[in-house]
Amino acid sequence: MKRALITGITGQDGLYLGELLISKGYEVYGLVRGQNNPKLDTVRRILPEVKLIFGDLTDLPSLLRALETARPHEVYNLGAISFVAYSWENASMTSDVTGKGAFNMLEATRLWAGSKLDDVRFYQASSSEMFGKVQEVPQRESTLLWPRSPYGVAKVFAHYMTINYRESYGMHASSGILFNHESPRRGPEFVTRKITQAVARISLGLQETVALGNLDASRDWGFAGDYVEAMWLMLQQEQADDYVIATGETQTIRELLEVAFGHVGITDWERHVTQDPRFMRPAEVDLLVGDPAKARETLGWKPKVDFRELVQMMVDSDIEDQRQTSR
Ligand code: NDP
Ligand code: GDR
């Protein structure tokens, strides 16, 4: 039986990846941080089979203990401070967790595996935020990185450290450069979920407006359930490598609003949206669109859920949540 250790098990991707690996017969271990993590109950409900280990990406000894307990064939490093807007306010902590945390996990894996390093495979959750002020459209694996936030900078460090472990120690370490991916499990601080929750409440007469920041940014949005398959596929390849995972299409926040409000029959969405400078960023990433050709050709991966289906799935799920809460 294959064993996997996932950091960031309480996050959106950790939950989907946990489900995927369980369905493939893996024994799955998940790293959980904190004294009384409020998301523990969700993990236990969705993934009762997963064995939880307490530890923190900033605490290397705890990672070594986690590895000794799980004895994984595959390590998925999904843990991070992942909210870009928050990373300006907590740049130091973001560097420690999102950047140095990845190094800690790589180094802990190398130390733990010792002479058996060939038996372990490592996945690093890299991000399209590394492209920032994009130097090429669409963005591919070879595009020059130009991050625009402390989060993006920390991810660039983690990305190159992963490549460095591959090149220095021959470690099977792959980096998935994933573009935005969403789902009904997306944190409510991110723009898709913020909008679909608001649309659900507005359609039920529970709220009038939603305050947003920049409506002109474009993102390449896919479905998280599809994207975790790409993570797994990367670790099944003979050679470790870096892959862009994206849909190849891009939409603005305005288009997202149109589809989300349109799904509940509201066509004049402008009436329900205000703009608030609090949600503007010190430096914006204006346009992201990925070229997933390498993943398609080498991994045989392609997304199954398109943008419209994704937004509609999220709105429907939020309407159902609201109905249950008010019952
Ligand atoms: P989430 O924000 O939903 O999850 C982040 C996870 O990291 C949580 O489980 C969180 O735990 C954990 N974490 C935070 N701090 C620490 C720490 N100090 N030690 C251990 N774990 C910690 O992110 P997603 O699931 O959306 O993303 C997964 C990964 O993929 C992240 O690294 C993200 O940066 C990256 N990524 C995401 C993309 C997306 O569009 N979703 C796109 C590209 C990359 P807790 O619950 O305790 O806070
Ligand atoms: P992003 O996602 O920064 O791309 O990072 P987010 O949904 O936060 O922002 C997307 C775009 O929407 C604009 N925006 C707003 N964003 C938020 N959160 N709230 C608002 O009110 C709002 N109004 C407009 C933003 O300015 C931005 O342009 C996500 C995270 O999951 C990262 O961890 C991951 O690496 C990248 O996606 C790829």
Image (cartoon, rainbow, N blue to C red):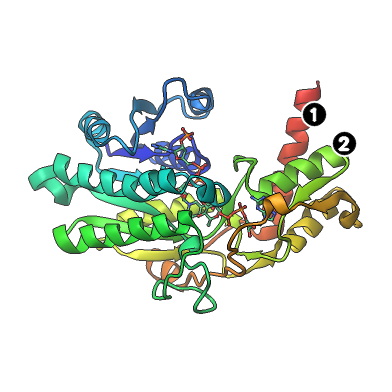
- Mark seen at residue 194: none
Residue at the extreme bottom: 136
Left or right: residue 127 versus residue 267 is left
Mark 2 in CB contact with mark 1 (< 8 angstroms): yes
Residue under label 2: 204
Residue 58 appears left or right of 127: left
Amino acid under disc 1: Arg
The kind of residue tagged 2 is Leu
* Residue 283 location (% of width, % of height): 58, 63
- At horizontal 60% and vertical 43% (from top left) the residue drawn is 186
Q: Label 1: which residue?
A: 323
Which residue sits at x=43%, y=46%? Answer: 94
- Callout 2 environment at 10 Å: few (<14), some (14 to 19), or many (20+)? some
Q: Which quarter of the rendered picture does the N terminus lie within?
A: top left
Residue 290 percent across, percent down from the top left: 52, 69
As measured in the structure, the alpha-carbon distance from the residue carrying label 2 to the one carrying label 1 is 9 Å
Depth check, front residue: 210 or 279: 279
Q: Is residue 23 above or below residue 269?
A: above
